[in-house]
Structures are given as C-alpha cells and as structure tokens.
Image: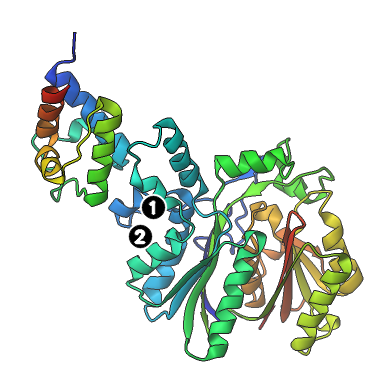
C-alpha cells in the first residue's frame, strides 16, 4: 500500500530541510501552503534546482520543462499533488 | 607591502583577542580543528547554509576586513585544496547517480576560487580577483602576486590570504602516505615527538595590505619559494632573497620555523636554525595549529603581531631566545612535506 498524502507531506518537508540545509528550520515548521520562494523561507534559483534533484532522487520524478516546474514548486501542497499524480 | 589589517580563524582563539591575551587552547588529538565563530551576524543565512568549511572560514575571516576596507583594489587567495569536502561529495554523486541529475551546490562551493569570488560578491568588489592553488606555496604565490601588482603601480590596497580545511578526503589520502601521525598527541609534545608524520590542521588568515602606510602591523618585504630543492639550493634561494633586500643573516633577529614534529622533516628546519641563523631567536607555530598547505598565512599573522609588540603569546612558541627586544625582522621558513619550500620576510 502506498503512502498517504499526509505521510508524503511529512517526508517531503524533511527532505526539503535536508537537501537545502535550512538552518534553524524544523520540517514541521513549514506550512503546507507556505510559498517556498517567498520572503519566509527565502529560497532562490539554486534551491529550485536542488528541489528538482530532490524529486528525481527521492521520488523518481523528472521535471524537464521550466514552465511546468514553476507551477509544481509553489508550496508543499503543489509538490505533493505532483508526486501523487505521477507516482 | 604594509599589513594594515588582519584576521584569522584557526584552532586557537584568534578570531577575537583571547589568543593574543594568552588564552591558548590545548589539544590531544590526531587533528586540530579550527574554532569557528558565530557567523550569523556576519554572513547572510542563505549563503551560510550552502558553505563548506573552507568557504565558511574564508568568508568569516575576510568579511570583517572587507567591511572595514571597502576600497580594495583586488582579492588574492591562496588555497591548495579549496572546498575539497564538497568537491569529493560532488564527484561521488556523479558515480552514485550514474551521471544523472546532480545537485549544483556542492559543485559551486567546491571550486577553490569560490572563496575569493564570494568575498568579492559580499564586498561588491569588481577588482582583480584570483586564487592560487600551488600546493604548499599557495599563500607565498598570493603574496608574490600582490608584490608584483604594487610594483606595477596601479593598485594601492589588496586583500590577500591563505585558507585550508581538513576534509575527510585529504586527511585519509595524506594519512595513507604517512603525512599524519597515527597516534593522538598533545600539542605541547608535538614538536619533540620524534616519530614520523605530523598533525593535520586547518585555518584561514587574511590580510589587508597597502603599498604605502604609516600605520601598520608589519611589512612583508619579500617572498621566495623553491620546489624539490637540495640543501644547497635552499641556501642559495635564501641568500638571494637576503641580498636583494641588503640584509645579512645576522640582520634577521628572529626566525619562525615550520617544525611539525615529523622526524623526517626536522633536518630542513635544523639547518636553517643552526647553520644559517645561529644567533637569531627561533619561534614555532605548528604546535598551535597543526600542519596544512597554507599554514604560512597563519605564521604571517602570528609574526605580524609579534613584530607589533605582542608578547603574551611568546611563551607558547619560543624555541630559542637570544634577544628579548621586540623583533624587527622575522623570516618565516616553511615547507609542506619537504616538496615546496617558502620564505616570507617580515619587518617593522
């Protein structure tokens, strides 16, 4: 049986903190609908590449189209949607 | 070349004044790790979270100097290995993920010129920017470039320095070639250990240097280097440097030697100490920080403070004292693994 949406969310947040080495941010502190590239987390273009690497390595999903990536990497909810739709 | 400002991160408390006030850290280990300050006030968190240690200690050492000296004409860094830990992590990923999607951060951080580049970005410095990766004389080459730039007459103020990190990779590889001792050893016993190998250290020492100044710590008068020399070659290299500065060996009141506790390395330093500078004061520095390829930058930091009159540190580094006056000339002699040998001449 596959993982539930909630389980994927928890796991994804841990991966985000680990891959991006977010200092002083705990996975549970990232809100599901918090913009990843907004002022709170302050991610930048290098982080977007790191997130693409994360999706490839952890979920076997490749984002090749930059326009597609912009819609996927909005927040945790949109990334989980993408994982569930393509897993 | 006048040293008008300087900063160091090392296995001693050199980032603040504690070390100069006599607070010496003692170690009993196979490595001497740098004591890092809290960077959060200094380095933007988004940059800090991506930095490997070499970049972090380099930026942490250089940023305060850049903040105080905005009109720098250039940045010249010597680092033999740069961010080697990140470099190996990136190379391992190429194999682990079969040349697939690779994370960019490790690659960006691992290039040796990442340190000078990020210092320039932080300081918005668009001047000369170069990194020397000449093994055990990387810092000597950075100095030489600075001297040449000043001689050309187009530059007035530069940031130069030497930086190295202990990476798992360099420690393991160098250990296989018996560069480091297998046994833990007290820092106070290192130089008399009489066994093969030394202790691996790390650190960053950076300097603001100017072509003219009336208010400075010390002058770097000259630098010389030679690779795979014989004793005769070494003597000739040193003699040439002294002669072009109109100095005799008796004018050098103090020497700073890179004794590192490796029984196979001592004879080079003993020759300089006992055959050429028999009457000079003799100091050591690797008992404080261990050995690494750009440690002569730390020796320059230490010697600058001694020439500037700091005395509380002398009890930790004095090997032979013939003259208790504040040194006027200090000659630093260092080699890494007997391959690349460097001299740095400092004067008041």
Helix or strand or loop: what does disc 1 sit on? helix
Question: Which residue in the structure is indicated by mark 2?
Answer: B42
Q: Residue at x 31, y 35 (%)?
A: A18
The answer to whether one can see residue B278 in this image is no
Helix or strand or loop: what does disc 2 sit on? loop
Image location of residue A21, percent across then percent down: 32, 41
Q: Which mark is residue B12?
A: none
Q: Residues within 10 Å of mark 2 (few under 14, many from 20)?
A: some
Observer-nearest of B245 and B17: B245
Image location of residue B39, percent across then percent down: 38, 54
Residue B72, compared with residue B341, is above or below; it is below
Q: Residue at x 67, y 43 (%)?
A: B174
- Pointer 2 indicates a residue of which chain? B
User: Looking at the rendering, which quadrant does residue B63 occupy?
Assistant: bottom left
Q: Quadrant of the N terminus of chain B?
A: bottom right
Spatial separation of the CA atoms under disc 1 and disc 2: 21 Å
Left or right: B114 with respect to B194?
Answer: left
Observer-nearest of B167 and B41: B167
Image location of residue B345, percent across then percent down: 70, 77
The answer to whether one can see residue B209 in this image is yes
Give the residue at the far right of this rendering. Answer: B275
Image location of residue A53, percent across then percent down: 28, 37
Question: Which residue in the structure is indicated by mark 1?
Answer: B108
Residue B182, compared with residue B63, is above or below; it is above
Q: Quadrant of the C terminus of chain B?
A: bottom right
């Amino acid at each position: 049986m596959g993982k539930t949406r909630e389980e994927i969310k928890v796991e994804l947040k841990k991966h985000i903190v680990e891959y991006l080495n977010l200092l002083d941010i705990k996975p549970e502190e990232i809100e599901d609908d918090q913009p990843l590239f907004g002022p709170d987390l302050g991610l930048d273009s290098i982080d977007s590449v790191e997130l693409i690497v994360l999706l490839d390595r952890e979920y076997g999903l490749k984002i090749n189209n930059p326009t597609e990536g912009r819609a996927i990497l909005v927040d945790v909810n949109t990334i989980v949607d993408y994982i569930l739709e393509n897993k | 070349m006048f040293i008008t400002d300087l900063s160091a991160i090392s296995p001693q408390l050199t980032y603040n004044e504690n070390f100069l006030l006599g607070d010496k850290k003692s170690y009993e280990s196979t490595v001497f790790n740098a004591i890092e300050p809290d960077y959060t006030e200094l380095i933007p968190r988004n940059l800090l979270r991506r930095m490997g240690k070499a970049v972090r200690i380099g930026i942490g050492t250089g940023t305060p100097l850049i903040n105080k000296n905005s009109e720098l004409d250039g940045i010249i860094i010597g680092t033999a290995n740069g961010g080697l830990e990140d470099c190996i992590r990136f190379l391992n990923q190429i194999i682990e993920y079969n040349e697939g999607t690779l994370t960019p951060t490790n690659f960006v951080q691992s290039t040796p010129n990442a340190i000078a580049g990020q210092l320039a970005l932080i300081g918005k410095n668009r001047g000369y920017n170069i990194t020397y990766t000449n093994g055990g004389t990387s810092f000597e080459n950075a100095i030489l470039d600075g001297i040449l730039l000043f001689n050309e007459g187009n530059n007035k103020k530069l940031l130069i320095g030497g930086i190295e990190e202990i990476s798992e990779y360099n420690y393991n590889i160098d250990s296989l070639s018996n560069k480091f001792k297998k046994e833990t050893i007290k820092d106070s016993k290192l130089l008399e250990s009489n066994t093969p190998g030394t202790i691996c250290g790390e650190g960053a020492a950076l300097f603001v240097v100017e072509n003219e100044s009336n208010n400075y710590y010390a002058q770097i008068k000259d630098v010389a280097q030679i690779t795979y020399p014989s004793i005769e070659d070494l003597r000739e290299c040193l003699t040439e440097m002294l002669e072009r500065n109109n100095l005799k060996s008796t004018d050098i009141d103090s020497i700073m030697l890179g004794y590192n506790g490796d029984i196979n390395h001592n004879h080079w330093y003993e020759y300089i100490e006992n055959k050429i500078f028999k009457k000079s004061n003799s100091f050591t520095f690797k008992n404080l920080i261990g050995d690494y390829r750009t440690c002569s930058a730390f020796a320059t930091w230490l010697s600058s403070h001694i020439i500037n009159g700091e005395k509380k540190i002398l009890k930790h580094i004095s090997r032979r004292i013939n003259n208790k006056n504040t040194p006027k000339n200090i000659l630093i002699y260092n080699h890494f693994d007997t391959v690349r040998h460097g001299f740095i001449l400092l004067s008041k």
